Amino acid sequence: MPKLNKKLIVPILLVFAIAVGFGAGLFIGKSSKSSLEEISSLNNPELNRPGNVDFSLFWDVWKEVESKYVDRSSVDTQKMVYGAISGMLIALGDPYTTFMPPDENKKFSETMKGEFGGIGAEVSSRNGIITIVAPLEGTPAKQAGLQPLDQIIKIDDKSTENLNVDEAVNLIRGPKGTEVKLMIMRDGWQEPKEFKITRDTIRVPSMKWEMKDGDIAYIQLYQFTENITVEFEKAANEIAKSNAKGIVLDMRGNPGGYLESANEIAGWFLPKGQLVVTEDSGNGKKVEYRTPGGEQKLENYPLVVLIDSGSASASEILAGALRDDKNVKLVGMKSFGKGSVQQLNDLPGGSSLKVTVAKWLTPSGKSIMHDGLEPDEKVEVTQDDIDKGNDPQLQKALELLK
């Protein structure tokens, strides 16, 4: 999942200015009168108009729809504005830059707070295909057998071919107890298979920990939610008081979340001021994120990190920092490769804009976008392992610590 920083870096009305203000003062074809002047349903056509963009075609189309569309009385002009904004962003070709109308924005906020209605699978766009990043622990998606990198071909009877991520999520979500059908294609299959999944109230767990082999602390980080740092601090203090001689940090299937949470957790393993990640805006401007001051109670424990194709975004940042700064070994499979920075901007009326503003670089300067992180010890999990309840990746991590 993307970095979510609610600090505004652009004027809050920027999106509305693009959608509703480009045509002011421009002229159309053979007429000396702008189509914008003939549109009666817009309240603020002059807002922040840019003078160097010819947006007359947009207003021509709007005028034609307003004057000739057969069901003019049922036209929702606000939805038309939302659709225009969404179409503009789709044209960028970046699946992570998206506009969320109020209803979608509300669902997104619920997700980041750790509770929502759905199946419990993080999805993204990979090579233009709606793809499972990770099914979350203890959810209907996990129980149904969905796996990272599963491609979603259809949602119920609707093809995902022309859907963006937010549209797909909106179709998958739904009230508890209702059913959604997903047509899934998986690497190695000859043809797609249908999964019928009953939605539930999804309460996203942040983490859990336990002792393995008597003296190895095993920490699972499921997602970097708002409250994970409080839970992690409690666990770290308990581990520091235990007889643990090493730590396995399991971020398999962790789709990411808040950068700030990942940065704070890095501070338990690394010295104060250590570089965690660099935000590269591509214009010569770079912002470094370093570990905050703290107790670093876990700094001296031998550590192994587990990753797989469901490890994305903030989990890749943390894993990359621990390897680059502390020479920690990564065990498992290559991570997802979600290495771009999204900034969340709240807009009037309850909508919001997620816009890609930069790429992540690990402390060594490596971009994780698309390429992901290659494990130091590659260990596959076969279907036979899954059926028998074996976990060869965890076993390898425990062997390295012993």
Image: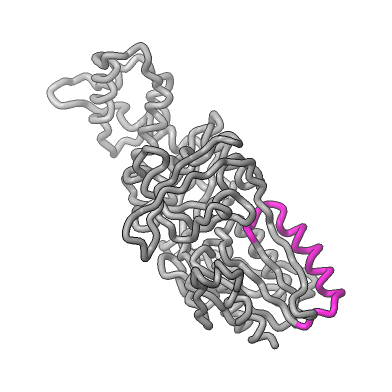
Residue plotted at (27% across, 33% down): 55
Which residue is depicted at the point 44% across and 60% down?
Answer: 149
Task: Locate residue 373 relative to residue 19 in the image: left or right.
Answer: right
Above-or-below relation of 177 to 342: above
Above/below status of 57 relative to 121: above
Left of 137 or right of it: where is 366?
A: left
Q: How is the image coloured?
A: one colour
How many numbered marks are there?
0
Q: Residue furthest right?
A: 241
On the image, the x and y values in percent for residue 195 come to: 46, 48
Q: Nearer the viewer, residue 340 or 279?
A: 340
Find residue 100 and report its horizontal and vertical position in percent: 48, 38
Residue at the (24%, 22%) spot, across then down: 34
Query: From this viewpoint, is residue 402 visible?
Result: yes
The residue at 70%/88% (across/down) is: 402
Residue 227 falls within the magenta-colored stretch: yes
- Image position, residue 180 (x, y; %): 49, 40
Would you say residue 290 sits in the magenta stretch?
Answer: no
Q: Residue 127 versus residue 323: which sits nearer the camera?
A: 127
Q: Is residue 288 in view from this perspective?
A: no
Q: Which residues are magenta?
A: 222-245
Task: Provide residue 69's location: percent of width, then percent of height.
Answer: 26, 16
**Left or right: residue 377 compared with residue 46:** right
